[in-house]
Each structure stands twice: as structure tokens, then as C-alpha cells.
Image (spheres, coloured by chain):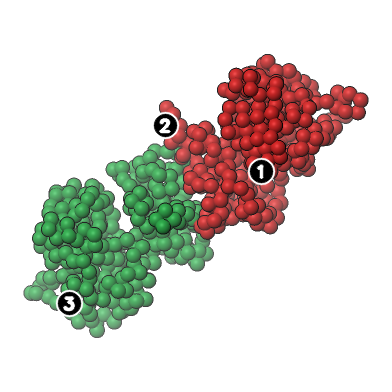
Chain colours: A green, B red
């Protein structure tokens, strides 16, 4: 936390030009990275299977705010080929976070800021064990976006990004990041308390992600059916109590806000439902297991949340069997 | 409860010949009624869609204890055509219990014993409101049996029937019923406390019936997967605590007994899974809603059980939509 020991960020005149890396160019990373690039920032994108396609065709974003095309694009297959960057946005699934220990070092210089734009709880803590001197932040995307095909992303609603500091804050860089996003027409909030922001996001993520998978349905049908709507409310209240046990005060009215917000959402499949339907591993550990464990360590068992975790783990293990 | 006012049952010499009616000749009613008929008792069976088939072909039971054939058979389409009987065994789904008010009266004489061989809680109470002067008992079948086709039942494991008195006991008739079942090679126990027996059955029924539906699997896979096995145990313990709140003491070791018993069972789909797979209404009210409500009225919320109830109600309402 000895901020005065950190060198000042590289500035050109009064404008700091930050170099961005996007690790995990899926629907979220592709959208935010695409916005930054489209607004004139230097952005380097890591791709896996889509590398060849995107290298020749660029990245197309169909957005409710106007479609755009990132081409040519700084695309890479491996972080070993990428330059060190000022801001590394990690937007891959948290199921792959075990790879960050190997992937991140080529991207880091002394002042690099790493932002984990991921769902769940506990990711920053895990990363900090490997990178105790790096500036680590967490990012919470409030956005409806999905991949429609190779190099093509559809953005259908919202877009807000909230970022909070986990360790080694660098206020000036963070302020520039905020300006860069705002210039790229991404609503951007700096959360005073990352833990508070992460728990608030869980109030939504925990019921809808898992229940759309287990009940094989959509948020819309869940909301229109009395029994499942009540279950969503029960689980949200459990998460609020769990957060409270961990020292995060969320007003009960927030639950009603989330229900109303979901009522007014376009029909939408949460990311875990898309993962499940496409036989990708689900983010059970960060969205369910970590919150259940952490709340329990603070004295409260989120019983229904734990049950959903157990059901999802069952479905994941069945999925794993089928892949063998 | 004024037992001394009840006339003595009709006896021939020292042997009382009881006349039986089976209401709901599915896998359970067909098996027990078939056993009684095969052993020489007078049994009258109510059928619906299978009436014509059974009238000409009789009822075939493929049993691990030896196959047998009930033919000719006393089959009926309506209770209005049936004689009054000494013992009425109700083995239809509890979802249809609303019809009993109309169905039962032709079958009843002054001393008729009605036995509800059904799963769940609260059925006897509901029936007693309509028939306050009738002898009402509850029956709990511990049996693996299923319908394989019209007039054909397969009995693959177990067979025990436990019966307990709800109101207006008639000890001599009950003793004769016990003898009749034992003569028909059906292990038969008279439970001193029906409520205790019903809650003990719920310890098994609650986790396995609903979870095989929601997770679309079998008891065997549930038991072999760590997460779902733990969930079953969690739910069983909730039911034990719920029973305790209602004054029914079940020792915790009973949970381990149930788990071990299930480990050694043949792969089996609980009745609710069969109902769901065949688009029949599920017995959610008696197996889930009543126990959750009753335990809550006694001060304990079975939280995971309630969640399973909510999930099942969601699936039921989706099923209802598809039927419209």
C-alpha cells in the first residue's frame, strides 16, 4: 500500500496513454476491448480458437449502441508474443484462472494493473497469492452480450462496468482507465469497496445462473412462474444475509430492485446457462463454492445456495462423464 | 374412539373373512391386491383405462417371489358398481384424493376400514374431515414395483407394508388384515405411531423422488456422485430435524441406514420420476408442501426441502403449460 514508492505512470503531456491487454476475448472481453480499440486506444487481444479467423476478418460487434468493426486488430495466440501492457483485463472464465500464473508474467511491467472482470468471489485473493506486488482490481460487468460466431459479438442490453481495488491501488492510472472507458461510451464506476460490489452482483448471479441451468429455462420464465420467482427471492435474501455475515451490508430493498430489474430485462440466458448448453465447464467454484464457504466461515450457511451448488456440481460431473 | 360401541366384525367360526377393495390398481395397489386375491381372499379392483384389457386378460404380476396371474378378476370401472367392503385400500396417487369424497361412499359399511397406501403427509387428516366416523389408517409401502403394460406389473424388490391407525381403531379387523397379508406373503407391520412411520418414509422419499426428477437421473447415479450424495444426506437430516419439531423423534443413525439401504438397492426410479417421465401430475403437495408447511408451523423451516418443492412446482407448471 506504499503508494508513494510507486513511480508516476508514463504520461504524454497531461494525457496518459495506457496500453491495454484483453485476456479472454469472449463476449465480455471482446466487447470492452473492442470499445476501447474503437475509441482509439492501443489494445492487444489474446485469442485461442478464433485467432486465424479474427486475424483476417477482425472483430465485429453488433451493439444496441451502434455496430462497429475492429480491423485490423492486434491479435495474438499466446501472451508470450504480447507486449507488456499498462492494463490487463482478464475476461476469461474463472474456471481457467489456474493458467494465469503462467500467462500473466509476459504482460506485466512494474506498474501494470490487472483487472479480473469475472463473476463470483475469491478470484483476486487467489491471484494475489501468486502476484503479491501487482496492482489487482476486480471488475463487474453489468451487460447482456454474447458471442454469435467466430469474431462476432452481439451486445443486446446494458454495458456498465464497475471496478474496485483489491491490492496496491494506483489512483492516477485508475482515473485514466475510467476516462478511457467513458470515452469509449462504456459507463464506468469505481467501487469504493470491491467486496461489496462483488456480493451485490452475486445477489443476481447466484439465483439466475444456476436455476436457469438446473430448471433448463430462462430468466423470463423463472420470473413469470410463482414458485421459481419465490425461490429466486429466497435465494437473494440468503445471499444478502450471507453478505451481512461477511461484513457487507446490503439493504433488503436491493432484492426488490434486482427482481424489478430482471422483470424489465430482455429474455436472456445467463453465462452459466450458455456454458452448460455448450458443454463448457461452469463457474461453480467462484459463483457458488467460494461464497458458500466464505459465508459459512463467517457463521452463516446459505442453505439453498449450497443446494444449488450441489446440484450444479452433479450436472457438471455428468457432463464430465460424457466427455470421457 | 369409543371402540366398545363398535359391533364385532363378521366372523365365520374363528376366521374372519374380509372383503377387500383396491382403489387405484396401479403398481402398488395391483401388487398388494393381486397378492391378496392370489391367496384366496375376495378382492374387488377398480380400474380406469385398463378395465377392458384386464376384464378379459386378468392381472399378471411378475414378481421376484414368483410370477402369478389373477384371472378371472373382480374388475370395475366405477365404485358405484362395487360392493361395500370391509377393507378399502386406496393406492391411487394422492393427487387424485379430491375424488375420494365421491368415490368412497358406495364402498363403505359401518365398520369399513380405509387404508391410504400413499406417500407423503396429511392425507388422512384431509380424508377424516369428510369421513369423521370411518376407521382411517395410513399405509406405507416399502416396495420396488412398476407397471410394465396394461394389466401387467413387475415387482423387482422388497414388498413390506406398514400400516398405522389414524382414527377410530378396530383392533380385531386390523389383526385379521395383518394375517391376510402375511398369508399372502406380504411382510406386514402395524406401526404404533402412524405419524412416526410417515415421517420415516419421508426421510427417503423427499430427497430421492424430487432429485431424480430435477437432476433427471436415478438413485444409483445420485449415490455414486459426491455432491448429490451429500445433498441427499443434507436433506435427510433436514427431514429428521423437521420431524423432531413435530414431535417425531428419529435417531440420526436412521439417515445412515437409509443411505446404506439405497446403496444396496437395485437401480430404481422413484414414483415421482416415473410420473414426471410419463407426464403425470407429481405428488408435490403431499410429499413436499404438506411436510414443509407442517414443520414450519412447528417452528422449523426445512430450507432445502422447500427449495426442491419450489423446483418441482416450477417443472409441474411447465408440464401443465405443455398440456394446454
Q: In the rendered image, which residue does mark 3 sit on?
A: A9
Q: In the rendered image, which residue does mark 2 sit on?
A: B322
**Element at badge 3?**
loop
How far is the residue under mark 2 from the one under mark 1?
34 Å
| Image label count | 3
Q: Are marks 2 and 3 on the same chain?
A: no
Give coordinates of residue A292: x percent, y percent.
47, 61
Q: Earlier in the sequence, mark 2 or mark 1?
A: 1
Q: In the rendered image, which residue does mark 1 sit on?
A: B157
Residue that appears at 74% across and 29% down:
B38
* Mark 1 belongs to chain: B
**Residue A17 in view (yes/no):** yes
* Mark 2 belongs to chain: B
**Element at badge 1?**
strand
Residue that appears at 75% across and 38% down:
B186
Residue B98, relative to residue B277: is it above or below?
above
In the rendered structure, the answer to whether residue A146 lies left or right of residue A284 reads left
Residue A176 got which mark? none
Give coordinates of residue A79: x percent, y percent.
22, 71
Q: Quadrant of the N terminus of chain A?
A: bottom left
Amino acid at each position: 500500500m506504499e503508494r508513494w514508492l510507486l513511480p508516476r505512470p508514463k504520461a504524454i503531456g497531461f494525457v496518459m496513454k495506457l496500453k491495454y491487454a484483453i485476456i479472454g476475448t469472449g463476449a465480455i472481453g471482446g466487447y470492452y476491448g473492442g470499445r476501447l480499440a474503437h475509441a482509439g486506444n492501443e489494445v492487444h487481444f489474446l485469442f485461442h480458437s478464433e485467432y486465424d479467423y479474427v486475424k483476417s476478418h477482425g472483430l465485429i460487434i453488433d451493439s444496441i449502441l451502434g455496430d462497429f468493426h475492429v480491423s485490423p486488430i492486434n491479435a495474438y495466440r499466446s501472451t508470450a508474443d504480447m507486449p507488456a501492457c499498462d492494463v490487463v483485463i482478464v475476461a476469461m472464465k474463472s474456471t481457467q484462472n489456474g493458467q494465469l500464473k503462467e500467462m500473466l508474467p509476459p504482460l506485466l511491467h512494474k506498474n501494470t494493473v490487472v483487472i479480473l472482470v469475472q463473476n463470483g468471489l475469491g478470484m483476486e485473493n487467489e491471484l494475489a497469492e501468486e502476484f503479491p506486488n501487482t496492482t489487482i482490481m476486480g471488475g463487474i460487468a453489468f451487460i447482456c452480450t454474447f458471442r454469435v460466431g467466430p469474431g462476432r459479438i452481439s451486445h443486446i442490453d446494458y454495458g456498465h462496468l464497475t471496478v474496485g481495488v483489491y491490492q496496491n491501488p494506483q489512483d492516477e492510472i485508475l482515473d485514466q482507465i475510467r476516462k478511457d472507458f467513458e470515452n469509449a461510451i462504456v459507463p464506468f464506476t469505481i467501487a469504493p469497496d470491491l467486496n461489496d460490489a462483488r456480493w451485490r452482483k452475486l445477489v443476481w448471479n447466484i439465483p439466475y445462473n444456476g436455476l436457469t441451468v438446473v430448471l433448463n429455462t430462462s430468466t423470463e420464465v423463472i420470473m413469470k412462474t410463482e414458485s421459481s420467482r419465490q425461490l429466486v427471492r429466497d435465494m437473494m435474501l440468503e445471499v444478502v444475509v450471507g453478505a451481512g455475515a461477511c461484513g457487507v451490508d446490503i439493504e433488503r430493498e436491493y432484492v426488490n430492485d434486482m427482481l424489478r430489474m430482471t422483470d424489465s430485462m430482455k429474455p436472456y440466458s445467463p453465462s452459466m446457462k450458455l456454458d452448460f448448453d455448450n458443454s463448457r465447464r461452469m463457474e461453480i467454484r467462484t459463483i457458488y463454492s467460494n461464497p458458500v464457504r466464505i459465508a459459512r466461515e463467517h457463521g452463516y450457511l446459505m442453505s439453498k445456495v449450497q443446494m444449488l451448488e450441489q446440484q450444479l456440481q452433479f450436472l457438471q460431473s455428468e457432463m464430465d462423464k460424457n466427455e470421457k
